[in-house]
Image (cartoon, rainbow, N blue to C red):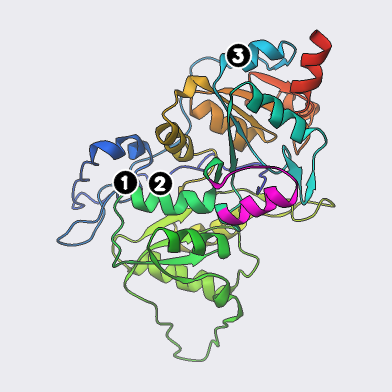
Amino acid sequence: MLMTRGVSDAFLAVSASASSRSPAPRALPTGRRFFSALLPPSSSFSSSNRHFGPRRRLGRRSSTMARAAAQRLENVDELIDSVETFIFDCDGVIWKGDKLIDGVPGTLDMLRSKGKRLVFVTNNSTKSRKQYGKKFETLGLSVSEEEIFASSFAAAAYLKSIDFPKDKKVYVIGEDGILKELELAGYQYLGGPEDGDKKIELKPGFFMEHDHNVGAVVVGFDRYFNYYKVQYGTLCIRENPGCLFIATNRDAVTHLTDAQEWAGGGSMVGAISGSTQREPLVVGKPSTFMMDYLANRFGILKSQICMVGDRLDTDILFGQNGGCKTLLVLSGVTSLQMLQSPSNSIQPDFYTNKISDLVTLKAAAV
């Protein structure tokens, strides 16, 4: 997963206002109403002009009361019995880089033996669900593709939820995972890694062409990021009427290695946001889109879900925004000192050292 630090308060904001001449948004079909909280600057293509409707501002749920300080997890049985589904972040919870965290297999086996549904959600868009399935298999974990939800999949699922036209194209600033999920969803795309070697020769009078049939620009973590992609994405968003600006996440940093933190997908998103003066629609955590999708997909109540993660401003906020129970593990980027800092306003329901504590604390209580 691409782990964040100091995510902007505008992580879900779209443009604050729209032109009074913009057409009214089309109502979503009944089966898609649960997506309405994430309507982009334009919620659907009009058959007449292919423009989107007015923009809506999105943000964190409001609260007039401060959340109580997190409790150290002690009564494991009570937590397990109170929910049907456990949603796990991956990096920092299940693994670190390419190394499995101690005790994970036994913990997942114990939860499955109790009939709990397990779901794995990651903001990392570099892989598709199928590719993540192979990583789980390599680490010795039996996880089906249906249990995996990456932000690459969320981008394609979001486009499907708004009936994004199949005759429109998607420009991708990102890696192979996004391309594979768009292809599976039946969308035309361009960009991605193959644009990583492209350069712009800034000669006098040079004019850069772009495809005017691009209706969405999807930005994710991209190790092949360059100025060509910045300019191409900018032209599409600024000059193509109704073009969507979608971000898989705004993670400030990621763990490409276990030695240090590296610039995350938020740095790529920030570049496009800066050049277009537009805020993206974010489909990854802490946006509620994936939570809504999961609840609808499996037919589960959000109050019956426990979100387990190592990151306050993505994982825990994701769970809180979705109305779920939350468990912070200290095996990733968040320390106990960070959690208890007076400057931290995000408090999970519970915290513990790592997910294997669900087993060891349960055994100690017997």
The number of discs equals 3
Q: Nearer the viewer, mark 2 or mark 3?
A: 3
Q: For residue 237, which quarter of the picture? A: bottom left
Circle 2 residue: 14
Q: For residue 276, which quarter of the picture? A: bottom left
Residue 202 in the figure: left or right of residue 72: left
* Disc 2 from disc 1: Cα separation: 7 Å
* Disc 1 from disc 3: Cα separation: 41 Å
**Which quarter shows the C terminus?**
top right
Mark 1 or mark 3: whose residue is earlier in sequence = 1
User: Is any atom of residue 280 visible in this view?
Assistant: no
Q: For residue 127, which quarter of the picture? A: bottom right
Residue occupying the point 29% across, 36% down = 33
Circle 1 residue: 55
Magenta range? 130-145
Residue 131 shown in magenta: yes
Mark 2 or mark 1: whose residue is earlier in sequence = 2
Q: CB of mark 2 within 8 Å of CB of mark 1?
A: yes
Residue occupying the point 56% across, 76% down = 194
Q: Nearer the viewer, residue 101 or 45?
A: 101
Q: Nearer the viewer, residue 92 or 360?
A: 360
Q: Residue furthest front?
A: 113
Q: Is residue 209 above or below residue 71?
A: below
User: Is any atom of residue 249 visible in this view?
Assistant: yes
Circle 3 residue: 81
* Disc 2 from disc 3: Cα separation: 39 Å
Q: Residue furthest bottom?
A: 204
Amino acid type for the residue under numbered disc 3:
Asp
Residue 238 shown in magenta: no
- What is the number of the mark on residue 213? none
Q: Nearer the viewer, residue 159 or 282?
A: 159
